[in-house]
Image (cartoon, rainbow, N blue to C red):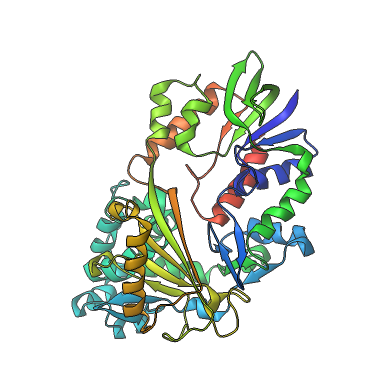
Amino acid sequence: MRDVIILGAGLTGLTTAYHLKKRALDFVVLDQAPRTGGVIQSVREDGFLYEEGPNSGVMGNIEVIKLFEELGTDCELEVANNLVKKRYVLKAGKWEALPSGLKASVMTPLFSLKDKFRILFEPFRPAGKDPHETLAGLVKRRLGKSFLDYAIDPFIIGVYAGDPSRLVPKYALPKLYNLEQKYGSFIGGTIKKQLQTKTEEEKKVNRGVFSVKGGLSALIYAMEGCIGKENILLNTSAVRVIPVEDHFEVSFLDISGERIFLPTKKVISTIGAYQLDKVMPFIDPVAMSKITALHYTRVLEVILGFKEWKGIKLDAFGGLIPFAEKRDLLGVLFMSALFKDRAPEGGALFSIFMGGVRRTDIYQLTDETVKEIVQREICDLMLLQDFNPELFKILRHPWAIPQYEADSGERFHAIEKIEKQYPGLVLGGNLRDGIGMADRILQAKKLAEAV
């Protein structure tokens, strides 16, 4: 009899196991993949270091800071340099720096003159009353359409690869939503929050962009070492969870095809919403349908590396491309400009994103067509005359990013109902509590505390 079985050995599952190990609980982590880390995978190839999953995280809560402090020399935090503060947005085929303050917002060509005047009166507009108002509706109401098209839309493209007319701030961007609800204004709320006295822990949370020296896989290896490989079972397929009197029975097929049965007092799931109905067939189909209905967007990513870069100066986090520009790319991250040793000296490494919610057609294209699009767009946008990359990798992410849309409230309610009905069952993962690495690390701590 195990104390806990964790489903999923991605960042959430491993961090949960890390906290359970500290509490000396008897647990095992199951995953269908042959390795831990989920989508996190760092690759070294021909002088380049790139990520096959998330490229970086944000130090958005104290649990991220504490995790790295506890892991110590086993996992060395790498904070992006100051170029990360500069971000480009494409308008009329030209890169413009996204303004970071009120003065820059007035001077930038990204926003219309009408909306620049509107922003002066933003603190005086009444707060919205519709909890399911879309992000597009919220931004147009408070700031204007040009702010939506050339500030919020590219931001959402960079985070969710999503559509502001479908995402609901209450669920997708709760901090933004609460600024208006609590303080009545984005600008006023931001100023008031900055004036509040911060604790020493809060001062550490600087929202800096981070990676890990040697790639994000080093974080996975460090946690794996702390957890103990003997507590992780990989290559497990056809996992099933069944409640049996006062405990659960978890079974799976091992690599030889034999079905293994493990009894456990509690189960923590960190797997995707699209997998849950098969893993937990005992749950009421109506309640489960509220969870499996979660919309995941597909994203196509291209890793592009040059040993000698001859294009524009790489002096920013990257460039985001608003949907209004009608291009075939979502954005380009300048990875070698942010972190050390990502490309040979004088070279460049890029992560290019395509597809998303509004361009589902892109994901279906052949590799040859994708390469033609990337060559055309990069030569144009990055002022590159000769397209001869030493590294060109196409990565397809079929379950890339969950979209926190209007049905999210029903999903959260269904999860709460199921957990009450089956004490000892905890449903986590990116189907709730946010999608970023910091969100996953924070949720993992809460999942561990819940059991």
Q: Tell me where residue 327 appears, x and y as whole percent.
A: 27, 68
The part of the image, by quadrant, that contains residue 197 is: bottom right
Residue 333 vs residue 369, the one in the foreground? 369
The part of the image, by quadrant, that contains residue 77 is: bottom right
Residue 321 vs residue 154, the one in the foreground? 321
The part of the image, by quadrant, that contains residue 82 is: bottom right
In the picture as drawn, the residue positioned furthest to the left comes out as 114
Q: Tell me where residue 381 appears, x and y as whole percent.
A: 33, 78
Which residue is pictured at 43% across the width and 60% down the height?
301
Q: Is 61 positioned to the left or the right of 320 in the image?
A: right
Q: Count of labels shown?
A: 0
Which residue is pictured at 43% across the width and 27% down the height?
288
Kindly tell me whether residue 156 is visible in this rendering.
no
Q: Quadrant of the C terminus?
A: top right
Q: Is 275 positioned to the left or the right of 141 in the image?
A: right
Q: Tell me where residue 321 appears, x and y as whole percent.
A: 33, 69
Q: In the figure, 395 relative to 254: above or below?
A: below
Q: Tell me where residue 141 appears, x and y as whole percent.
A: 24, 61
Q: In the figure, 70 relative to 451: above or below?
A: below
Residue 92 vs residue 139, the one in the foreground? 92
In the picture as drawn, the residue positioned furthest to the right comes out as 24
Q: Is 35 positioned to the left or the right of 55 in the image?
A: right
Kindly tell me whether residue 40 is visible in this rendering.
yes
Q: Quadrant of the N terminus?
A: top right
